[in-house]
Amino acid sequence: MKTLVLEPKTLIQAVYLPSTPLRRVFLTASGAALIAALAQVSLRLPFTPVPVTGQTLGVFLVGAALGSAMGFRSVFLYLLAGAMGLPVFAGGGSGVAWLLGPSGGYLLAFPLAAWLVGYLVERYSADRRPVLALLTMLVASVLVYAGGLTWLKVYLAALGQASDLQTLLKLGFYPFVAGDLLKVVLASGLLPGSWKLVKAFGRL
């Protein structure tokens, strides 16, 4: 009688099958640590309250590598750690105030973006071909910007400042779109390349 072997849907499944509860905890924490590390790659611009960071690259990689459920939990753990006072946000920031500040919408959209990337990877193997990976990261980026700009509008309005569309784009989109496109391209190259390495080393 032949044993049924399921094809791995994510990179972690390809490398670390079979999964165990302890291993899942370790991977979830490792994903949160990766995002925290990339958050320290940050730049403050004088004309916007939202910093430029490497967080989104981490969110996309974690979602793709861990899958939808574990990716969501990993990013949620990252936000929880920051809210509880660990210096994991941009520039070593921490506290609930970060989630309520101008960057809050982007941060709160991260778990959903990771879940979406993971879902598309699991459903369509979107991380194995550069074009599909690129489209996946672009869709996730739209989700992050939607959350970020929506909350930024609320934040600015609460301060009595202008919150029209042009102001929102000037503060929360235009300064970041070039860098985010670079991160999307980088992720869409790293993921298919990682699958090739996995196959080269005989894991598949």
Image (tube, rainbow, N blue to C red):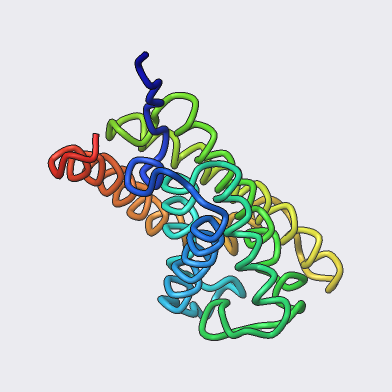
Direction from residue 55 to residue 190 in the image, left or right: left
Q: Position of residue 5 (x, y in %)?
A: 37, 25
Question: Does 184 sit above or below residue 133?
Answer: below
Q: Nearer the viewer, residue 137 or 13?
A: 13
Kindly identify the residue that appears in the image at 41 percent across and 76 percent down.
Answer: 41
Q: Nearer the viewer, residue 178 or 168?
A: 178
Kindly identify the residue that appears in the image at 53 percent across and 73 percent down.
Answer: 51
Q: Position of residue 62 (x, y in %)?
A: 46, 53
Question: Does 176 sit above or below residue 90?
Answer: above
Direction from residue 51 to residue 192 in the image, left or right: left
Question: Does 58 sit above or below residue 2?
Answer: below
Furthest toward the left, the residue is 200
Tell how many labels.
0
Furthest toward the top, the residue is 1
Position of the N terminus, as image quadrant, is: top left
Position of the C terminus, as image quadrant, is: top left
Q: Nearer the viewer, residue 67 or 111?
A: 67
Kindly identify the residue that appears in the image at 86 percent across and 69 percent down.
Answer: 158
- Residue 152: name its quadrant: bottom right
Furthest toward the front, the residue is 1
Direction from residue 179 to residue 107 in the image, left or right: right
Q: Which of 137 and 197 is in front in this view?
A: 197
